[in-house]
């Protein structure tokens, strides 16, 4: 599957912010230098989705806040099951 992500670097913590019109908004503590934020997004998503980092590939947007990721062997339903609880959890702590 392909996933569009809008990344906010230099955040106070790594978190999923929201999901609007098939765009996942993520806040990452890493700085947007030398691919650090891109790598942090992949590591963060692999932990949340409980999959290997090698299953997530940055397809486009390496220098943009809007990125397109390819995630192998994951359906939209599986993604929703793992992402939506994280969004609710973040709202409870805000």
Image: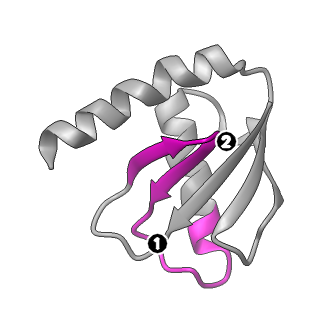
Looking at the image, how many numbered discs can be counted on the residues?
2
- The segment highlighted magenta reads 15-38
- Magenta span contains residue 33: yes
The residue shown at (60%, 16%) is 78
| Residue 27 percent across, percent down from the top left | 42, 60
Q: CA distance from mark 2 to mark 1?
A: 17 Å
Residue lying at the far left in this picture: please name it. 93
Q: Are marks 2 and 1 in contact (CB under 8 Å)?
A: no
The residue shown at (57%, 69%) is 37
Foreground disc of the pair 2, 1: 1
Q: Quadrant of residue 34?
A: bottom right
| Residue 52 percent across, percent down from the top left | 65, 33
| Residue 35 percent across, percent down from the top left | 67, 74
Q: In the figure, 72 relative to 44: above or below?
A: above
Q: In the figure, 33 relative to 44: above or below?
A: below
Residue at which label 1 appears: 30
Residue lying at the far bottom in this picture: please name it. 33
The residue shown at (63%, 71%) is 65
The residue shown at (77%, 53%) is 68
- Magenta span contains residue 80: no
Here the colouring is one colour
Q: In the figure, 38 relative to 76: above or below?
A: below
Q: Quadrant of residue 60?
A: bottom right
Label 2: element kind: helix
Label 1: element kind: loop
Residue at which label 2 appears: 53
């Amino acid at each position: 599957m392909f996933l569009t992500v809008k990344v906010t670097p230099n955040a106070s913590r790594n978190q999923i912010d929201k999901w609007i019109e098939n765009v996942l908004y993520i806040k990452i503590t890493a700085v947007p230098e030398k691919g650090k934020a891109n790598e942090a997004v992949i590591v963060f998503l692999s932990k949340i989705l409980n999959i290997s980092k090698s299953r997530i590939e940055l397809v486009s947007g390496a220098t943009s806040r809007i990125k397109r990721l390819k995630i192998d062997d994951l359906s939209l339903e599986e993604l929703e099951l793992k992402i939506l609880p994280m969004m609710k959890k973040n709202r409870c702590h805000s």
